[in-house]
Amino acid sequence: MSQVIYDRPPGLDDGTQPPRQRTRLVEIVIPVYNEQLVLADSVHRLHEYLAENLPYPFRITIADNASTDETWAAALDLADRYPHVDAVHLDQKGRGRALRTVWEASDAEVVAYMDVDLSTGLDAFLPLIAPLMSGHSDLAIGSRLARGAAVVRGPKREFISRTYNLMLRSAMAARFSDAQCGFKAGRTEIIKALLPQVQDQAWFFDTELLLLAERSGLRIHEVPVDWVDDPDSRVDIVQTALDDLRGMWRVGRQALRGGFKAPVQARVLAAQLPQGMRKQLPSFAIIGVASTLAYLLLYWVLRAVCPAYLANTLALALTAIANTAANRRYTFGVRGSANALRHQFEGGVAFLIGLALTNGALAVLSAAAPGTSHTVELATLIAANAMATLVRFLLMRAWVFNPRRTGQPERP
């Protein structure tokens, strides 16, 4: 079990005062790991800004995730120096673990978090929490992809971010635009109801929380933000991407089994999907994630002995056959061998569209950045394949496995 050390006992202002009653308090968590060089300056900037601009009482809680440098000492110093700063130390890493620990113990009306580098412009904070304070929304997120956002970052991180969010929208039917921006808030009672269902303790924590909120019919407010990339970011992009894919697979499997929903009262009813689609989407998403992983693995292996275009064509063709067969059986409920060959030929139309999209993406990449690495090629293919996945689902539902053609009843 992880050990948690508080600068002040949770629920107490000091060692003598009684537990605080819930007020209009806003608690902002800053999760940190080995951030001794920037922590003091960031907390000072944030404290000064909130003291001058926020019309609500606030508390800044520094959540130290098992730092190995002097971060915890710096956090304790800041907690002593500023009246509205607390510090919490955990002996295990994980941004999700840090947020969960502080949010579960919070007595605030609204809880929020932001990255220690303050990459997001602080002028967006009041628009972030205002709809939560008014009761208009349940959660709120800063979005670097919404209209009106101003973002400064390199093309690699821009591409990765857009690819990840495109995959969420295509495979998981997510409606929010930016899952990864480190600038989020929620009504505390809602957050506490969601947390028991959220399993991830690291970077996928945000995404899982938002997917669960949408699945539960809760209202998510998006705020366009100004955001400047931190060149000193130490996030392991490859490992984080793999962890996110595993998280998407786990959540999709839970949703398919009907277990991915929190016991909360939805404020706004979820939009009604067309008949049958509510059950088809989770199955299609799980099969799609598995197919994508198999496709990328095949491409990586074949790329060692084949040109990029040939490796892409072979990998896509093999996984397309398996994808069509799996969706035929599990997503659209078509059993037996009747018309199986015809379905594969018609599924080949989706394969050709996917082939055009992925080979086209490779051609653009080759023209724009000759001699690029295989890793960048894979990232490019993930984005193109996400678009092809959406087209594949629409074709299969509306044409290949349309109940009027298969004779199968429409699933409710």
Image (cartoon, rainbow, N blue to C red):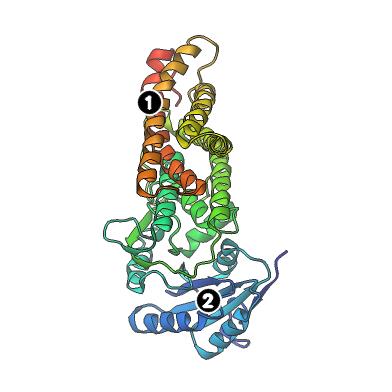
Quadrant assignment, res 345: top left
The answer to whether the residues at label 1 and label 2 have Cβ atoms under 8 Å apart is no
CA–CA distance in space, label 1 to label 2: 49 Å
- Farthest residue in the left direction? 148
Q: In the rendered image of this protein, does residue 46 appear above or below residue 181?
A: below
Mark 1 / mark 2, whichever is N-terminal: 2
Q: Which mark is residue 312?
A: none
- The amino acid marked with disc number 2 is Thr
Which residue appears at 58% of the width and 46% of the height?
246
Q: Which residue is mark 2?
A: 61
Q: Is residue 175 above or below residue 188?
A: above
Which residue is at the far right? 1
Does residue 107 show up?
no
Judge by depth and name the residue closer to the eye, 282 or 286: 286
Q: Position of residue 156 (x, y in %)?
A: 42, 56
Q: Position of residue 412 (x, y in %)?
A: 44, 27
Neighbour tally class for label 2: few under 14, some 14-19, many 20 plus, Cα within 10 Å: many
Residue 347: x percent and y percent?
Answer: 43, 21
Q: Regarding mark 2 in the picture, which secondary structure is present there?
A: strand
Q: Which residue ends up furthest to the top in the rendered image?
A: 338
Left or right: 73 in relation to 375: right
Tag shown at residue 395: 1
